[in-house]
Image (spheres, helix red, strand yellow):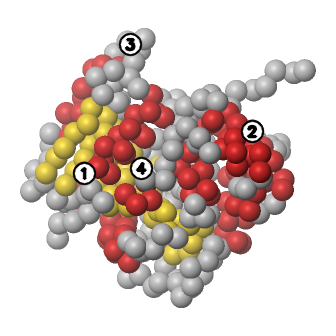
Amino acid sequence: MALETPIAFCIFNRPALTRKVFEAIAVAKPRRLLVIGDGARANRPGELELVDQTREIIGLVNWDCDVQVNYASQNMGCKQRISSGLDWAFQQSDELIILEDDCLPDPSFFSYCDELLERYRDDDRIMMISGDNFQPQPRTNNSYYFSRWAHIWGWASWRRAWEHFDMEISTWPRAKADHSLRSAFSSEREYRNWEPILDRQFAGEIDTWDFPWQYACWANHGLSIVPEQNLISNIGFGGDATHTVDPESHLANRPTTAIGELVHPPLILPNHEADQHTLENIFDPMFSPQPSNPKPKWYRRLMPTRKAA
């Protein structure tokens, strides 16, 4: 059966990875495929050929599918390309399933997104549906839980939610001054850890779009849906990645499990136990690395080491 929800597929210069994810998309047979591609960097010899090879894969669509492409002629960078591409994609559709070239989905990911996009279509409390689970064990007896963290390695959302996205996080200075975002965090320490990141994002010093999306979720008291089984394997960790450069990361190549028939939670409340685990095992190492849990290499790419005073 063909997938009704359009897929936005973000690609760049990694044809081998792109082909693997494309093959997973081909199994789902979406009726619409919206492809977002960045241009080659002028100072990277051979990258133009890789970009061309990657885009050629989209020509392999052999099912009934309306393919639309939004390709940059010059390199825009991760931050501007994905954000502008999703702006374009949400102009084409009210709802999207979103995959990047290194986010390999379990086959059940697509029906999971499709069902939940319909279920929460008009519920403004829900900003997104994630395919990622980084928990050591299930947190509930349901198929998914609600979280204040926006995991975007394979996700889905609505135009109504994306309309809150502001790449410049223009409300941050006022929110910082009156502490109005403080209630989005579990502790004062957590808030103080994120404060300098938001400062640097506002100053344009971080080349990423996902922190502004996380900010949009916090600023609008929005929740994300997280599956109790991991549905996405990030296969792109390595030296050719933009941010996920450490192939030994515990987040790399995580196995996936089919989610089956969905059992829906009776209440729409964030799971604090799960969110605390995410904080301590994914985000805390960025701020307070320990010898047993050092600062992740992808984070060092985002946040250059500060000079000693």
Of mark 2 and mark 3, the one earlier in the sequence is: 3
Q: Is residue 20 left or right of residue 44?
A: left
Q: Residue furthest bottom?
A: 266
Q: Nearer the viewer, mark 4 or mark 3?
A: 3
Amino acid at the residue labelled 2? Pro
At which x and y percent is residue 154? 43, 55
Name the residue beneath numbered marker 2. Answer: 196
State which tag comes first along the sequence, 2 or 1: 1
Q: Give the CA separation, mark 1 to mark 3.
A: 30 Å
Position in image of residue 147 (x %, y %): 60, 67
Residue drawn at point x = 22 percent, y = 65 percent: 3
Residue 144 in view of the camera: yes
Label 2 near label 4: C-beta < 8 Å? Answer: no
Q: Which residue is mark 4?
A: 103
Element type at mark 2:
helix
Residue 225 seen in this snapshot: no
In the rendered structure, which amino acid carries the disc numbered 4?
Cys
Marks counted in the figure total 4
Residue 92 is marked as 1
Cα distance in 3D space between marks 4 and 2: 29 Å
**In front: 82, or 216?**
216
> What amino acid does circle 3 point to?
Ala
Identify the residue position indicated by label 3 in the image. 42
Question: How far, Cα to Cα, is label 2 from label 1?
Answer: 35 Å
Screen quadrant of the N terminus: bottom left
Considering only vertical position in the picture, is 255 above or below 238?
below
Q: CA distance from mark 2 to mark 3?
A: 32 Å
